[in-house]
Image (cartoon, coloured by chain):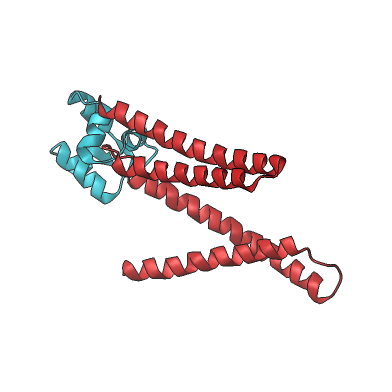
Chain colours: A red, B cyan
Amino acid sequence: MGDAAVEQRDQWLMATALGIGVSGLIAGLVAGAVLEANIVVYVGIATFWLGIAGHEAIRKRSTVTLFDERDTRIDREASAVAVRTFVYLFVVGAPPLVTLAVTDTSVVPQQAWGVLSACVLLFLVYAIAYVVLGDRHL
Amino acid sequence: MKNDLRERREKAELSQADLAEGVGVTRQTINAIERERYDPSLELAFTLAEYFECSIEEIFDPDG
């Protein structure tokens, strides 16, 4: 089998493993809710993790290069866009939420605080990773 | 960045997969470089130049 065929096969296997994992999770959650059986949810979650593990195992064991500098650059740019989106969400969302809460104008839903906290947490992880990695590359 | 990677590869009768394997990147990266959609790192540019036994400037034209 040529390298191009191996690459195509391995990429298909990785996508399939991921697809099975995600489908298993969704199916488990839906079936668990419908059947009211927690065991189905647990099986769904186990399928999800197996799918992720399979994806990583195929990537690591592949005989061809599946992730190189171009993928790294795409990954970096996508991460930057994601972080920037969350920062904008925080910058735009935080002041009105705090204002509403402080002035008792409206009761801010708990979910809104959850989203805000997730934004802060994500940015903190990013900032710590940035400092640690920056230090390593000095 | 303008380059003549495709011409060099075809002259050497190599597929994109062959060249990708030879320089340790994915076939998509070679394809992206040939289509001038991706500028390789300095390290990869050196590897490509070494592979074709020429200088980087002979493959890549920064003014292109």
Q: Eyeballing the image, is A26 above or below A94?
A: above
Vertical relation: A122 (above or below) A39: below
Question: Can I make out residue A107 in this image?
Answer: yes
Q: Could you tell me which residue is drawn at 75 percent across and 67 percent down?
A: A97
User: Where does the C terminus of chain A fall, quadrant-wise?
Assistant: bottom left
Q: Would residue A67 be seen by someone viewing this image from the given angle?
A: no
x and y, in percent, of residue A48 in the image: 51, 44
Q: Nearer the viewer, residue A40 or A138?
A: A40
> Which residue sits at x=30%, y=29%?
A6
Residue at 85%, 74% in the rendered image: A104
Please tell me which residue lies in front, A107 or A103: A107
Camera-nearest residue between A86 and B1: A86
Side of A111 relative to A54 (left or right): right
Point out residue A35 in the picture as x, y percentages from the top left corner: 70, 40
In what quadrant of the picture does the N terminus of chain A appear? top left
Check the image and name the residue furthest to the left.
B53
Image vertical order of residue A103 relative to residue A13, above or below: below
- Give me the residue at 63% from left, 60% from top: A88
Q: Quadrant of residue B28?
A: top left
Count of numbered circles in the view: 0
Instruction: Give how far across and how far down residue B8 sits, in percent.
Output: 21, 29
**Residue A20, horizontal then vertical, whole percent:** 50, 36
Q: Residue furthest bottom?
A: A102
